[in-house]
Amino acid sequence: MSGPVLEIRNLSVRLPKGGDRVHAVEDVSFSVNPGEIVCVVGESGSGKSVTAHSVMGLLPKGQLAVDGGQILLDGEDMVTAPMSRLRALRGTKMSMIFQEPMTALNPVVTCGEQIDEVLEIHTDLSQAERKEKVLAVMEAVRLPDPAKMFDAYPHQLSGGQRQRIMIAQALVLDPSLLIADEPTTALDVTTQAQILKLVAEMQQRRGTGVLFITHDFGVVAEIAHRVVVMQKGKVVETGAAKDVLTRPQHPYTQMLINSVPTLTPPHREVMEGPIALETVKLNKTYGGGGFFQKKREVKAASDVDIRVRRGETLGIVGESGSGKSTVARCIARLIEPTSGAILVGNMDVALMSERQLRPHRKHCQIVFQDPYRSLNPRRLVGQSIVEGPINFGVSPAEALEKARDLMALVGLAPDALDRYPHQFSGGQRQRICIARALAMEPEVLIADEAVSALDVSVQKQVLALLDDVRKKFELAVLFITHDLRVAAQICDRIAVMQNGVVVEHGKTTEIFANPTHAYTKALFEAAPGKDFEFARVA
Amino acid sequence: MVGAIIVLVMVFIGLIAPLIATSDPSGINPAARNRVPMAESSFRTDDGTRKTMVHYMGTDTLGRDVYSRVVYGARVSIFIGVAVSVLSVSIGLFIGLMAGYFRWLDSVIMRIMDGLMAIPAILLAIALVSLSRAGVLTVIVAIVVPEVPRVVRLVRSVVLSVREEPYVEAAVMSGTPTYLLLIRHVLPNTVAPLLVQGTFICASAILVEAILSFLGIGIPPQIPTWGNIMAEGRQLFRVFPHNILFPGIFLALTVLAVNMLGDGLRDTLDPKMEKRG
Amino acid sequence: QGAANVLRVVMHSDLRIVDPIWTTAYIVRNHGYMIYDTLFAMDAQGQIKPQMVDTFTESADKLTYSFTLRDGLLWHDNKPVTAEDCVASIKRWSARDPLGQTVMGFVAEMTAKDARTFEIKLKEPTGLLIFALGKPSSNVPFMMPKRVADTDPNTQISEFIGSGPFVFQRDEWRPGDKAVYTKFAGYKPRPEPASSLAGGKVVKVDRVEWRVITDQQQAVNALLAGEVDIIEAPSHDLLPLIKADRSIKIFNWNPLGNQYTMRFNHTTAPFNSQKVRQAALYALNQEDFLKATIGDAEYYKVCKAMFVCGSPLETLAGMEDKLESNFAKSKQLLQEAGYKGEPVVLLHSTDLQVLTNLAPVAKELLQKGGFTVDMQSMDWQTVVARRVKRDPPTQGGWSAMLTSWVSADILNPVMAGFFNSSGDKAAFGWPTDPEIEALRARFARASTAAEQKQIAEAVQRRVAENPTHVHLGQWYLPGATRPNISGWLAAPAPVFWNIEKARA
Amino acid sequence: MISYILRRLLAIVPVLFTVAVMVFLMLRLTPGDPAAIIAGDNATTQQIIDIRTKLGLEQPILQQFFIWLGNIVRGDLGESFFFRKTVWELISDRLEPTFSLALLTMIIAVVVAIPLGVLAAYKQGTWIDRIVMGFSVIGFSVPVFVIGYLMIYVFAIKLGWFPVQGYQRFANGIGGFLQSLILPAFTLSVIYIALIARMTRTSVLEVLNEDYIRTARAKGQTEIKVLFQHALKNAAVPIATVVGIGVALLIGGVVVTESVYSIPGLGRLTVDAVLARDFPVIQAIILAFSLVYVLINLLVDLSYTIFDPRIRY
Ligand SMILES: Nc1ncnc2c1ncn2[C@@H]1O[C@H](COP(=O)(O)OP(=O)(O)OP(=O)(O)O)[C@@H](O)[C@H]1O
Ligand SMILES: Nc1ncnc2c1ncn2[C@@H]1O[C@H](COP(=O)(O)OP(=O)(O)OP(=O)(O)O)[C@@H](O)[C@H]1O
Ligand SMILES: [Mg+2]
Ligand SMILES: [Mg+2]
């Protein structure tokens, strides 16, 4: 067998009426050879997942359908194959792993059984033989204590472990094609690094052809042999990984690669403004107490001391669950800290009641991660923006006038005020949220993962905007992110959090150049594509 | 859609009942008892002349014209449905908002609601209606009481989830006072589920009224409702089925239509759909 | 041997209270006839015949009566029935029954002479004593063992032992479901053939079960399907359905039937005025009520005789021009009375089939006669609670209500409770009329039939002038039986001796 | 887990207390005089007052309430005003039919409704879906008694398969017992089937959009097993919830069904007691039904742990 495991020829998939465009995927052709990792990149909605699902025959019935082209798996056309044949091939010749390890496993079935299911469907092995095989593959994906994991339910495992179960499930019958749809996007960088390593290793050992979907160029740099770039359902560029990453041909590819922030922090001026925000021994413990039910206690922040000057951006980085959002929400007083002091504009807001707090609300504003849920879908953008100022006594006309100025500032047309949030893209909404925060003329702006949900290209613009307004209004910015590349670009100083504790704290350039804490080092170590300088095409 | 049309037609029938009814719905005519549909009867008017009329749906054991009763019955039955749903939704909305937003109130209110909810609705209604004087108002109160906790739960769950929405938190950050927060940001989110719930309450109220009448403790018969027309006719179900048949068809059709309307509303107002928009 | 011969009967109502002296409810009276026996009983000709009594003597001055019980009478615990038992039973009965109270007013003393003989001495003669002891309907003077009869009349008895032809199976009694009676092996029927409530009570089945089926139509369905054998009182409107099955027998077991009655509340406006009550009497007519509730003319009878058509005291006296729906006359009387439209609060009971249609008819007729009527609907139990309230109509009181009497209860002005016009001591409605009271007292003393008849006429004339209530016609409610049932006796109450059930 | 159950059982106390207060107040504050009903037709006013005194109805309401509550706590439900039996005797006599009817109804409903709901979800948008949902809406729209009469007419009168009415005790043979219950149970189950089928459809539909369903399909699993092994098991919690909540509906339906079929159960007792203003019985029944409702819903909550290993108390 020398030909490609997967060859896609002129694949088109039609979208239902009223979709973004006529075809989700149009005239797509590429192939995957045995033992080769092909990465498909492209911004959100470019048709990556649809392509992958077409191969597996898993397009949602009645909504999407292939309307042209061929998908050849070892020479056999998947488009015309009957359902029963597809079913027989799934799990044996082709397998797939998905983005969300949290939801891709059935929560009410044990992990072992879920892997075993594949064997049960496709082989005649006895129960004992199957169990043996399952344990072997669990061992192979480096799951600790497979015998115990066999009977564990997915929720009892960490995200990385779950993804390993998924991989074990996909590889247990040695398929010739593995499709991975953003398998690491939802994971922490350290876990991501481990999973990437595992995929590469398994693929090498077994000679599997891998179709790897991602939008993270770091990941591409880390594992890809070849790259396929998609835009709006079309393939715009294909080539060897090195070539595409260093010498992108298509303007779209160039733009994408340009947008990837580098891991090298630029030089930034030292800010000497007055201290706008300070926390002293801030603690937050969730749970505990409870009248009828004893709740589990989580110490989400312990003795956090941070300090932000006006005009300065402090980044808080750390893995998921390390307590970043907790600190942010305490400072914004969306939740009440357990103890400690929070000094905003020389008032301690830590233990104020809601009523006392209201006058101080304007000093500190927050921009949230999810641009889709941050704006009330029923209210005009303008109404959302003027709500705050009017609460503080500004006349509606005046507030609206100012809102118009702000629109210009964040790069939107003034008539945007008279539209509803759903009429805007994610990036635009995030700009509106920033404008809303600015309308209050705050001294402190908290951005909790404010760019994490955005495509790289959009992310770049929003980052630029944030940096802009920081300068313009001398804002103290508390920037929360798990993305080191982003942190490197925008933060003056960085605080690294682990398990609710700030483990390292210092100037961005210094920490990136010379991390001292073991955790920080591990974090940097795991950043994908760290050794790769992306092309900078002006 | 079909649901909405049928509901409108029924409401319309109720509204113009005095115009389309052929006789006084509670005017008895002992001489013309138990006539089959389309039968004719003659009666003496007050001024002594004799008149003949056709009973499209026959007459009942008191010789009352079933057609006129059914037409007038639309009024009361639909009024009860609407009144019950409006009342339980508004009371439930208010309590639910309070419970959902003020944590210290929450546990007290919810314990009371748990208690109310544990009382089987029909039993409560039976007890209430039979003990006080049967009438439209009592029936409405009796059906509203057990419905309220369900609305409260619904509203509360919406509030609890909306409260966590970033846009609500953003409004909190803007210093919006609590009452405005509730009105501006929380209330609108309860509209769609309440509209849906309201239609189902309406449908079930019409049904419960019929059941209460069936058990002999509903609205007094001189006020015709579909329920008590059927209840009065039920003994003669096998001899003169028209007494049950016609109000039954109207009742089932209306309840069906209201339910369909609710289903339709649910599909179009589905929050999932909305988010995508 | 085969299964026991069980008679399954659907009665008109559920048996909940089981003290026939304590309550007047007909279902309890029927229960009484199952398990108790009476000293005297009324036969098919309306004559009072000895039942438990073997022989009795009346002294020449009509003041001393001596009764001897039949030989071999046994209680259900197989102890003999004694004269003492009977004296105690009469005492308890007479404490509650209006007719009993009247008769007791004449009694000087009652004494048990020996085990089988007792004597009643009167202060002055009355023709009512034997009649009262053979009173056919509520409250029937049923005989109970002394220990039971000694129970305070205002407390319900808690032991259900009689000397009647059936034994009550207390363990199997489930209110709302069924009541069970078995044949009493120790019962000695009289030698004469059974005639109405008198004569030999020969039980021809092993067991009688009263089944509760609240849904009338379901009862009929059950009868048609052979799940029950007898329906005591199927609704008139369902008779066509029953008749459709030709094998089912329909039997009018109560030839005297029942009488519809409208009761006035004499203590509040508007019916506290005699003229206004008269106006009502003119405005109403019987046919409309009967047609609206019964429908089929076979089962009703327009009858202006207050003491029932077909009874010895039947008369038209005083009623000739009344109950003819003479609205003009009614309006004229109202005007004379100075009626200013005070609303008649008319209680309408909605859950008893035989009463439901009465109030709407009354409302219609009264309105045509110039009254303002506020008809208030409620279930029967609420009517019962409401009608004893003496508050003004606006505060939960009432002006008029409609009910029905078993004809056997109203055969003369003394036993018929609605004629009692002693004000506060009278039944709800509380009429006050010394003239009527005087007549009733005379009636009690009358000792010949002719004298009784003459007084009854006078009472009727007086009541037509000053109405205490309005009688709205007689109606009959036949029972229905499966084809294999025979021997049901015509009587003022449904009785189950003499009935045979052939194996189907 | 044990401590959770204990805590939940403890939490029933305030709920029942609320029920007790509400019911008691409602009954005592509404008009209708049991004494007058007991006294009968010829009673004088004085007799009625005597009876009221005897029944304790002349005492202040608050006092009546605490006496009653105290008795209940001691397990004494009091004595019926009418039936000359203790309330406990009355209720325990009626338990069997009602319990059997409700249980059989639930079994029928679950067995019929769940496959229907799953089928409708799987065939979403097709005519099968429409028929199932149409049936479900109709089930909600037609009053129980109408369904009852229709069933009696067809299955008992025309076809003669079942008795028209009545109830056979279990002790008298299971054949007659089942025969007497099947028709009422089917009647009562209609609305319950409608409810459960609808909920099953909704929650299965929701689950069918989940990633792990896609995963199962990606393994090559057959649709039947995807539906019943993966989807249904995940949809079980909301279905169980609605089964629990539906008990309230069931209790209401029991009253009507028992009336139609002349089943001597608690439902009939309720109607009889209400019509007779038999306060002790009404109070006890409502309290009992509320207790059952709360307990069933506790069971339902506990059943979640079987359906979903993530739920641990
Ligand atoms: N079930 C569906 N119904 C309608 N449109 C769909 C459906 N699934 C995908 N689409 C549309 O198809 C297009 C391609 O979607 P696809 O999921 O393949 O994007 P993607 O490249 O995987 O994006 P992402 O990086 O966000 O996962 C999008 O415009 C999307 O809106
Ligand atoms: N409302 C809450 N109740 C209980 N525990 C909570 C709550 N919110 C967060 N936690 C816990 O507190 C810890 C810190 O959570 P936090 O959201 O601050 O982390 P994070 O660093 O923002 O993570 P991510 O990058 O995933 O957003 C976690 O273990 C989380 O499970
Ligand atoms: Mg995708
Ligand atoms: Mg966070």
Image (tube, rainbow, N blue to C red):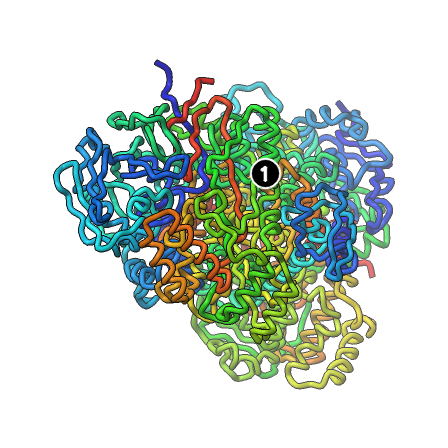
Q: Is residue D285 above or below residue A269?
A: above
Is A280 positioned to the left or the right of A45 in the image? left
Q: Which residue is depicted at the point 53% across and 69% down?
A: C275
Question: Given the image, what chain letter belongs to the residue carrying mark 1?
Answer: C
Residue A443, percent across and down? 62, 80
Q: Under 8 Å from ligand 1: the CB of mark 1?
A: no
- Quick one: D204 or C369, which is closer to the camera? C369
Q: Is residue B135 visible?
A: yes
Q: Is residue C288 above or below residue A54?
A: below
Q: Quadrant of the N terminus of chain A?
A: top right
Q: Is residue A213 above or below residue A483?
A: above
**Amino acid bearing label 1:** Glu
Residue A113, percent across and down? 52, 32
- Quick one: D55 or A30, which is closer to the camera? D55
Q: How many marks?
A: 1
Q: Residue furthest top?
A: C1
Q: Which residue is depicted at the point 44% across and 28% down?
A: D177
Is B3 positioned to the left or the right of A278 in the image? right
Residue D78, percent across and down? 30, 52
Q: Quadrant of the C terminus of chain A?
A: bottom right
Q: Is residue A215 above or below residue A362?
A: above
Label 1, secondary structure: give it: helix
Q: Could you say which quadrant of the image residue A489 lies in?
A: bottom right
Q: Is residue A501 visible?
A: no
For disc 1, the marked residue is C298
- Quick one: A500 or C106, which is closer to the camera? C106
Q: Which residue is depicted at the point 75% across and 47% down?
A: B41
Which class describes the residues within 10 Å of circle 1: few (<14), some (14-19), or many (20+)? few
Residue B112, percent across and down? 45, 61
Q: Could you say which quadrant of the image residue B192 lies in?
A: bottom right
- Quick one: A87 or B70, which is closer to the camera? B70
Q: Residue furthest left?
A: C114
